[in-house]
Amino acid sequence: MAYAVVAHYRCAPADADAVRAALLTAQEATRNEPANLMYEVHAVADEPGGFLLYERYTDAAGFEAHKAARHFREQIVETVWPLLTERSVTFAEVL
């Protein structure tokens, strides 16, 4: 069963360019993962510094493999997360 992840990130507007760049780098690498079905980064239209990520994997194990990837650690954990003021993540099984 496909596994979806929706992440809402918020950073200070001054950090938005750095967060955007790291998210787009992560997007490119993640789309090459064998279990990734979709990875889209969105800028929230009415919220400077707001981002929404929509991800789909073949299953939960595919998402776990994504979290173990070097690009996830470098771009998300080490670059994006320290710049965030808010972060929420929803996990779902695709019906």
Image (cartoon, rainbow, N blue to C red):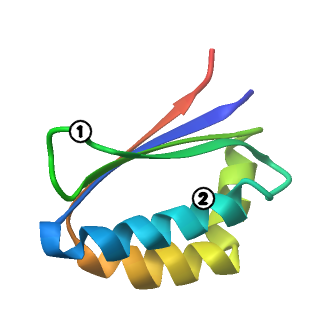
83 left or right of 68?
left
Question: What is the three-letter code of the residue carrying label 2?
Answer: Gln
Sequence-first disc among 1 and 2: 2
38 left or right of 25?
right
Looking at the picture, does residue 95 appear above or below residue 58?
above
**Callout 2 secondary element:** helix
Question: What is the three-letter code of the residue carrying label 1?
Answer: Ala
23 left or right of 72?
left
**Location of residue 53 in the rendering, given as x and y in whole percent from the top left corner:** 45, 46
**Callout 1 secondary element:** loop
Q: Who is closer to the viewer here, 75 or 94?
A: 75
Identify the residue under disc 2: 27
Looking at the picture, does residue 46 appear above or below residue 31?
above
Residue that sits furthest to the top in the current view: 95
Identify the residue under disc 1: 45
Task: Tell me what residue is drawn at x 58 percent, y 66 percent.
Answer: 26
Q: Who is closer to the viewer here, 60 or 9?
A: 9
**Location of residue 69 in the rendering, given as x and y in whole percent from the top left corner:** 70, 73
Looking at the picture, does residue 66 appear above or below residue 35?
below
Q: In which quarter of the image is the C terminus?
A: top right
Q: Nearer the viewer, mark 1 or mark 2?
A: 1
Callout 1 touching callout 2 (CB < 8 Å): no
67 left or right of 22?
right
Which disc is residue 18 wearing? none
Quadrant position of residue 4: top right
Number of numbered discs overlaid on the protein picture: 2
Residue 12 visible in the picture = no
Task: Tell me what residue is drawn at x 44 percent, y 85 percent.
Answer: 78
Q: Residues within 10 Å of mark 1 (few under 14, many from 20)?
A: few
Task: Tell me what residue is drawn at x 67 percent, y 72 percent.
Answer: 68
Q: Quadrant of the N terminus?
A: top right
Structural distance between the alpha carbons of marks 1 and 2: 19 Å
